[in-house]
Amino acid sequence: MALEVAMLTLAAATVGGGTKPALMPWPSSIEMGAGELAVGPGFRIAVTGKGGALVERAAKRFEARLALQTGLVLPDPVAPSGGPGLEIRCGSAGKPLPHLGMDESYALTVTPEGARLEAAEPWGVLRGMETFLQLVVPGSSSSFRVPAVAVLDRPRFPWRGLMLDSGRHFLTLDTIRRTLDGMAAVKLNTLHWHLTEDQGFRVESRRFPELQRMGSDGLFYTQAEIRDVIAYAAERGIRVYPEFDMPGHSTSWFVSHPELATAPGPYRIERRWGVFDPTMDPTKEEVYRLLDGFLGEMAALFPDPFLHVGGDENEGKAWDASERVQAFKRQKALATNHDLQAYFNRRLSKIVTGHGKQMMGWDEILHPDLPKDTVIHSWRGQESLGAAAKMGFRGVLSNGYYIDLVWSADRHYATDPWDKGVDQLPEADRERILGGEATMWSEYVSSETVDSRIWPRTAAIAERFWSPRAVKDVDDMYARLEVVSRWLEWLGLEHRAGYTRMLERLAGRQHHELRMLADVVEPLEDYQRGDTGDYTQQTPLNRLVDAARPESDAARAFSRQVAALLADPARQVGREAIRARLAEWAGLEVRLRPLLESRAILQEAVPLAAEASALAAAGLEALGFLEQGMLAPAAWWSSRAPLLEREKRPATALEVAYRPSIRKLMEAAAGR
Amino acid sequence: MALEVAMLTLAAATVGGGTKPALMPWPSSIEMGAGELAVGPGFRIAVTGKGGALVERAAKRFEARLALQTGLVLPDPVAPSGGPGLEIRCGSAGKPLPHLGMDESYALTVTPEGARLEAAEPWGVLRGMETFLQLVVPGSSSSFRVPAVAVLDRPRFPWRGLMLDSGRHFLTLDTIRRTLDGMAAVKLNTLHWHLTEDQGFRVESRRFPELQRMGSDGLFYTQAEIRDVIAYAAERGIRVYPEFDMPGHSTSWFVSHPELATAPGPYRIERRWGVFDPTMDPTKEEVYRLLDGFLGEMAALFPDPFLHVGGDENEGKAWDASERVQAFKRQKALATNHDLQAYFNRRLSKIVTGHGKQMMGWDEILHPDLPKDTVIHSWRGQESLGAAAKMGFRGVLSNGYYIDLVWSADRHYATDPWDKGVDQLPEADRERILGGEATMWSEYVSSETVDSRIWPRTAAIAERFWSPRAVKDVDDMYARLEVVSRWLEWLGLEHRAGYTRMLERLAGRQHHELRMLADVVEPLEDYQRGDTGDYTQQTPLNRLVDAARPESDAARAFSRQVAALLADPARQVGREAIRARLAEWAGLEVRLRPLLESRAILQEAVPLAAEASALAAAGLEALGFLEQGMLAPAAWWSSRAPLLEREKRPATALEVAYRPSIRKLMEAAAGR
């Protein structure tokens, strides 16, 4: 354990440079040994034990990826035997499908003589293979290498998920599959598939085919396709469970079945974003009959024992407006809409349970009457989960992991499921908090852009779910994340490649120039994008804001430079590098204006470039004052300070990412 | 026509800059008008006429792509009506499937008031949509634009194909689909799917499932998948027809059916590249029985009337070694192995015809006894096709279009199916030459790298098959190709994105440096790669040679600079730019050596970088002599001239792409 802590405090700069392996998630226990294992010609992989066909197939994929990383021929039929290698030993085949609580632990021992990966079940083998692949680095002129290491690893939480919202924007099967590849690479084990929304009914029902026929624009997954996805995920140790959101978020159901809704309709697929009024009518028996039939069909399609019924954001307006519902509430002595929704949920719970599933829903479903095997999925936060746990309910946290809000990775990383008092709960209660899920709501992503919204940030969240709570050094995380981000692309993910492609589409031959701007801006966080335009499901997601990455690496590096400069009493450290960066950015407007003004699609970035340049120019002035050791005049501060405030309604939903660093320089210069 | 020629001679530099549209293939007739059509908010697309569901679906895809290019909301439900737009008018629904000789003609008229695309059949609509999308360019601060233009367009050849070899390396379904998207974009209309090879049997047979079970490593297409591909292609106006190569190239069949082979076996899937001995035994009735069953099944699976039986590269060694075959030849009075193969082909032709298909095969099958509806596919050349045409056989040319040989685009572009006397044939004979196919043999490509081997060069070949023969200006082609290459990536092709990804995998953070070298090298042409290593089907295709593009844009630009300099009697034109390039390249070795030497996978590039630098240094010396107006001493020439010769067995299958330009500089300096 002492060694583990020592490892964690190794300078981040050594990651990728050699000493500290760029593992993510960081293992629960790791000891570095002496020397290294050469991975060169003749390297052999042997599968032993009783892991069965799943492990055999995983070994084939592993070999292909190792070959891709190293250029080695694997297996090499002509290599002399007896060379070093990796033995993969699995104790048993375990259950055929990944499941909550499956044993994902493994031990990986690497010495200069060879490596051994051992696990009791195939799930641990899968996790350990990813660790091994992350350990393989260019070693010398003749081989790759793996440092000598002893890893004993197991996850902190058994539920480590990613939610994909196929409802608002349909995501192609390719997208789902490559996302599963990425999830497996960072040891996530649960895909939460959000399949119905106001904006689309994305699953094939055979009993009620009108649901997808009229509710999906033809964009839905067939049952065969869903079975394929489940099998693909299972091969990678990932559970797949569906969400059918109700009683709200269900407009797309009502296109074919207006009788399910409280208000009479007719209904059309919703094209805008937000919370809408159409709601299922909990007073009608035909609602429960259809749900029984539909959920029964889905329960058979998805083998996982959990079934998510949503339950969020029902504001009750349709219920309030209905005489029938009001009468029902009086008759049943249901005082509030929350009580009415609880009634609905109890009925729903019986249906779900009747089909052999455990019900899951967002915070709003929490009610003491529900059976205790219900799982609460929290968008509200740890306190909410803690309260549910005390009532005996298990919970999964997503508050803090909303990756659609385009926060920086470190902000998600700082969120822990045990924060806000959860760690003070009695162990029996705390154990009910199963883990967390990153949530990829899809208002502003398409199959083209979703990779850059999921990756690489979700790797940091995956570490939060897998690694010990003490693993939380941000600089260290970012240093490893940079390496892992590149590695993830080798699986076919496009979070890096898509950036260039989109910039080329926006700027043609001049994409290098546009990139100078794109590299230093970030999409507005939280829900601000919706305020900057009139978005619908049809709005193309192909603008600069869609190309831009959630986090500007350049701005983050710059903020570290500025912090170092300001920490230096002599104001010397890195000053010239800062000046050079600022000078480049100060020139952005002049350099880019001809391009931006000549293209309709870039027009919105004209004020952004101007702002970027003005901020950099103010930063240069501040640097000048600091250099001369003089306090900036008050008049200077008051003329420049407005730059530090963002436009209230910017023309494009982007922000200059180095603005906070300019503020620091300016405040230092002005002695504020 | 005068205007068309005028267009062709417009300076290439104007492409992308504004004047000349970057269309590829260039239309058979185009007249530029005055002004332009704005494509901005409220732009409307109306489908009229009788094109039916295929045109409706094509219009949906067209709208999505136009939205992606422009950021416009299409269809925009809130835009005021009556704005400018595009009317798509189709005369009839035509036959349900694309077919040889389908009407692909269309007329596209664009004025500032609106655009109209008219075609008699859906196939012409599909082609015209691509033309329209290529015409849409950034126009102003408020909209995109399409220049006023009158296009009357139809293909020169009815058979414009691409062959994909799924046999040697399995290509994923995603790869096949995105390739079809690219084909449709450049108006290719035929996918020739090479499905069986020594190295793999890639199609599911239900009658003989052992064929794929034992012959494919599990890498084959199910019949459902093949039907999906055919449907996907048909939506895009592309025929799909299969090739089952026989009697040679058929080792993978013999793994499960050794009795089909001349030699007794046993057989294993072939892992190496080349021409192998195992050959079907034409003397055995059971061979024809199995082929009848299998081809009958395939004839039902593929609706296209053509079925390719290969027939190439049977060297007859297995036949020569067989007593039984020798006796059979004597008995049947077949003097040569060619006669025996003709016997085999006559039997095969009866089987193929009996299942309602027309037989196609490589040059080797040509024999006067075959029915005249047989199609000859020529790897040998135009003379071969001309001879076949005179005998009454139709033909398709692939000689000159072997894109696996990594030639430059202009070399393929210079090859015309009417070369070598074909244009002198009587029209009736000449008409039998149906067109051509680019062939993507897959010894050295994987699903990851194949895009960069197909694109963008195949766009130039597609132009050769579609556009008038007179369209052949190379500079003009390259100027348009650069724009079209980028445009093709928007379909999801990865010929550009994959380059960066692979360089990042090879060099990590230092990929920019590696790119400096990668940008100026090219894979060795023709079959030289096989001489540089011990390749098998298992060899990873992830080295610098796999990342490098078939053509170095930088080297091509440099060769034009050098030509301009040498054409200038004062040796002034562009001299400093040339010097700067050479100085950068001369520094490659020093700059890259630490990286290359530290990574096993890049080790092989050490001598390449040294060669690149030495060549550039010699170029700088030559430039010095030219500048001083003095002839280089003979001793200088003799010491430097060896640089101009390539290594006989280079460590990596790459060539310094600017070597020919250095030769020109050196020869000029030495007065040679």
Image: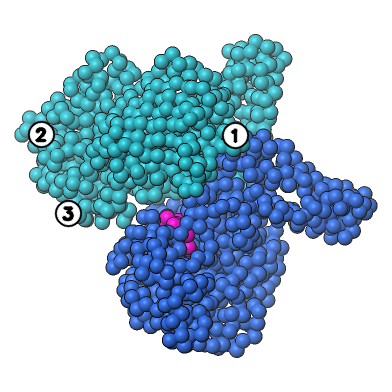
Chain colours: A cyan, B blue
Q: Which disc, if any, is residue B586?
A: none
**B26 left or right of A82 in image:** right
Residue picked out by circle 3: A207
The residue shown at (60%, 17%) is A564
- Hey, which residue is sitting farthest right in the picture? B630
Q: Secondary structure at mark 3?
A: loop
The residue shown at (50%, 57%) is B272
The residue shown at (64%, 85%) is B424
Name the spot of residue A409 as percent of width and height, x first. Answer: 45, 29
Q: Which residues are magenta?
A: B163-178
Asked whether disc 1 touches disc 2, contact meaning CB atoms under 8 Å apart, the reply is: no
Name the spot of residue B74 as percent of width and height, x first. Answer: 43, 55
Q: Secondary structure at mark 1?
A: loop
User: Which mark sits nearer the N-terminus, 1 or 2?
Assistant: 1
Query: Residue A661 is drawn in which quadrant?
Result: top right
Q: Which disc, if any, is residue A140?
A: 1
Q: Quadrant of the C terminus of chain B?
A: bottom right
Determine if the magenta segment contains residue A544: no
Q: Please tell me if label 1 and label 2 are on a single chain.
A: yes
Q: Which disc, if any, is residue A329?
A: 2
Q: Residues within 10 Å of mark 3 (few under 14, many from 20)?
A: few
Q: Nearer the viewer, residue B138 or A19?
A: A19
Q: Is residue B530 above or below residue B306?
A: above
